[in-house]
Image (cartoon, helix red, strand yellow):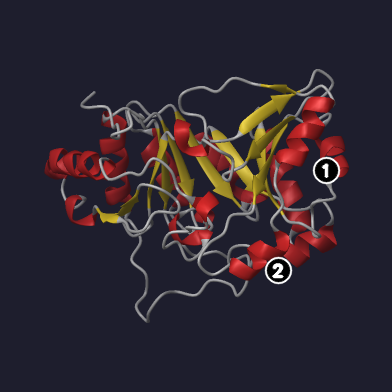
Amino acid sequence: MAIQFEDSFQRKFYYLRLSVTDVCNFKCTYCLPDGYRPEGHKKPSFLTLDEIERVTGAFAQCGTSKVRITGGEPSLRRDFTDIIRTVADQPGITKVATTTNGYRMAKHVHEWREAGLTNINVSVDSLDPKMFYQITGENMFNQVMEGIDAAFDAGFEQVKINTVLLKDLNSQELPKFLDWIKTRPIQLRFIELMQTGEMDNLFKKHHVSGVSIRNHLIANGWILKLKSSNDGPAQVFCHPDYMGEIGLIMPYEKDFCQSCNRLRVSANGKLHLCLFGDHGIDLRDLLEQDEQRDALIARIQGGLQQKSVSHFLQDGNTGMTPHLASIGG
């Protein structure tokens, strides 16, 4: 192993979120309410398989053990299974995860598993088909549920479900969700709505804090679990009477960034030090040849010295992120 990626606040980075496309076929109200709109008139040039191999190899050499393949919707890439296999083949990578809207899972999740996918997150913002359609803009609830069943059939011991909390939309569904995970090995992750450049009005109308859910869980016997070094930011709770778990992601909470262990590379090859940072650091010119790895590692490590102590979301600073699909959420 070369140097361990570390910032000026002594935070080490074991987790890479790698976006492979910013295209998505859903129109979620909190992300792409008008659907995918490519920037400019040129066809987007996303990272190639060779470039993905080089960037993940550099991260793996410097201590990264987990890669999450994101989008947009990553399974829209025709070479998605090859991407999984390429990432999984990197020495030192022990977890290969993806976050998907689930619409292709029923048909393809077995081959993803065989290619080396170890963890899977599915975005499900409601267990009510009508509300699911209202939030996502797509009538695919049944297909997504079939995909989750297929993931268990393929050998995944646990499936994580991402649910963005939306006041007056799905915020009343906690009892239904709890009943759903009582006999299923699902980690249900409630994510606070986050403010981005294009979503100010939606945020003001629908933001709800996860604190009330946490208080409810603790009062009803749920116990906070310890984290491992490459886990994400969720506070995970378990209960002796439930097969499933609850995760809470609350980015507005004090000290949320203190344990940050993840970096992001966008689909066009930019390093993002934070989901809500002000700019990206271009890596693509150093992804053309294997011989450029030392220079690539040096640029990433140099960029890390610019990483801020916090995202400052709590101060109303949303950075330059226009929407969550733009750099992989």
Q: Nearer the viewer, residue 292 or 115?
A: 292
Indicate left or right for 105 with 38 as reference: right
Q: Position of residue 220 (x, y in %)?
A: 85, 26
- Which quarter of the figure has residue 93? top left
Q: Secondary structure at mark 2?
A: loop
Q: Position of residue 132 (x, y in %)?
A: 77, 59
Residue type (three-letter) at the residue carrying disc 1 = Leu
Q: Residue at x 43, y 43 (%)?
A: 310
Indicate left or right for 248 with 172 as reference: left
Q: Secondary structure at mark 1?
A: helix
Q: Residue at x 47, y 66 (%)?
A: 322
Mark 1 or mark 2: which comes first in sequence? 2
Regarding residue 156, the answer to whether it shows in the image is no
- Which quarter of the figure has residue 189? top right
- In the image, residue 288 sits, relative to residue 298, either above or below, namely below
Residue type (three-letter) at the residue carrying disc 2 = Gly
> Where's the N terminus, which quadrant?
top left
Q: Position of residue 76 (x, y in %)?
A: 52, 59
Q: How far apart, in angstroms, are the residues tagged by discs 1 and 2?
A: 22 Å
Judging by the rendered image, the residue that carries numbered circle 2 is 137
Judging by the rendered image, the residue that carries numbered circle 1 is 174
